[in-house]
Amino acid sequence: MRRILGLAVVTLAGAVALEQFGFLNSRWGGGPRGSPVEQPSIGGVNLSPDASFRGLDGDLPSPIFGFLVLGATVLLALLVANVRRSSLGQRMLAVRSNERAAAAAGINVRNTKLAGFGIAAFIAGMAGALYAYNFGSVSSSRFGAVAALGLIAFAYFGGITMVSGAVIAGIGATEGLLPHAFDEWFGLNGNWALLIGGFALIITLLVNPEGIAGTGYKKKQEKLRREAAGISRPSPITALLAKARR
């Protein structure tokens, strides 16, 4: 646990350093004003949010960019799922469970961690590129350390042990479906979504350490094992009576 906390502190310090000396430094091409981004196109087909789409008015955004984001999300989810099933994924799970035991079993802990960081950086880079295409520009305010902490909180809330946890996190993250619904129905902006996400993270850490997706998968597997063994789950009243008899 001490090594994990140290890694988290060093990572946060590195993110703040890059933000201050890189993203906010106008001499290196950064700055708060941002830089325009060329809109995506494949074979001359405009895939940007402002692309024309037959059947929609000019005030409505084009769904073409949404299909592009959906396709990229599905491909990245398949990539993570295949990595999880591969020998590299098994080594990652072993390192996450117990580094010393994994090293004793002949697993190179350093190379495994570097591979995990590389895959995570690739996925984050793809997400950042799509995020920039959505707004048409890149600015330091959208990629700050505080915003990254908010995304990490929603990812942990959704479930970092499952691919489906990323989908749940995306629904609840800023500019997701839930914050959009709160804004449309109750007039609550994105700051309220971050506040709700913070409270949800605290509850998740106390009640469901594996997140919503991980806890749901664990309960499903336990139910399948009980059904295979022919054991029914006792009711709460039966459990209380059994404890009282002891």
Image (cartoon, rainbow, N blue to C red):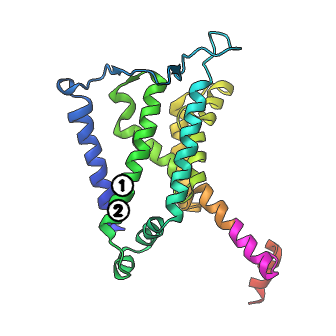
Instruction: Say what amino acid the circle numbered 2 marks.
Output: Lys
Say left or right for 200 vs 36: right
Snapshot quadrant of residue 159: bottom right
Residue drawn at point x = 36 percent, y = 52 percent: 118
Q: Quadrant of residue 220?
A: bottom right
Estimate how packed mark 1 is, as few (under 14), some (14 to 19) or many (20 or more) residues with alpha carbons within 10 Å. few
Taking the view exactly as shown, the residue that stands out farthest to the left is 27
**Along the viewing direction, whichever of 148 and 194 lies nearer the viewer:** 148
Determine whether, in the image, residue 147 is placed left or right of residue 69: left
Is residue 222 in the magenta section?
yes
Q: Which residue is mark 1?
A: 117
Quick one: quadrant of the N terminus? bottom left
Q: Which residue is mark 2?
A: 113
- Give x and y (percent) for residue 195: 52, 39
Q: Residue at x 47, y 32 (%)?
A: 130
What amino acid type is highlighted by mark number 1? Phe
To which quarter of the image does residue 163 belong?
bottom right
Range shown magenta: 220-233
